[in-house]
Amino acid sequence: MSKRRRFTAEFKARVVRAALREDKTISQLASEYGVHPNQISEWKRVALESLPDLFSKRKKSDEKERREKEERLLRQIGKLSVEVDWLKKKSDEYGIDY
């Protein structure tokens, strides 16, 4: 059974930059870098689709808002868990069954 090759982000970036220059064909790049042509095309597609995010400040603020909301929800879950535990304890004291 063959082991899958793993490529670093730096290697992928180098290959994609070469593909974007378009001074060589994908087949030539595949031969030069020892990567299947379909893999180079896929990396290039992913890179081009990700470009708008690189220039978007909104992404950073969206991430910050998401983190803040997550922290707020986790605090609320903790508070509610404490309240549920307290209510269970009190219901046991008074013999209340649910």
Image: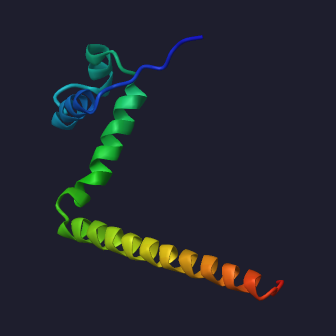
Residue 2 x %, y %: 54, 12
- Which quarter of the picture shows residue 61? bottom left
- What's the residue at 22%, 34% (across, down)? 13
Name the image quarter holding residue 1.
Answer: top right
Residue visible at 40% across and 30% down in the picture: 39
Residue 40 % position (x, y): 34, 31
Residue 37: x percent and y percent?
38, 25
Front residue of this view, candidates 30 and 8: 8
Q: Nearer the viewer, residue 24 or 9?
A: 9
- Residue, x 74% and y 84% (percent of image)? 93
Q: Quadrant of the C terminus?
A: bottom right
7 vs 96, left or right, is left
In the rendered image, which quarter is residue 64 located in? Answer: bottom left
- Decide if residue 81 is on the left or right side of residue 64: right
Nearer-the-camera pick, 76 or 66:
76
Q: Position of residue 4 (x, y in %)?
A: 48, 20
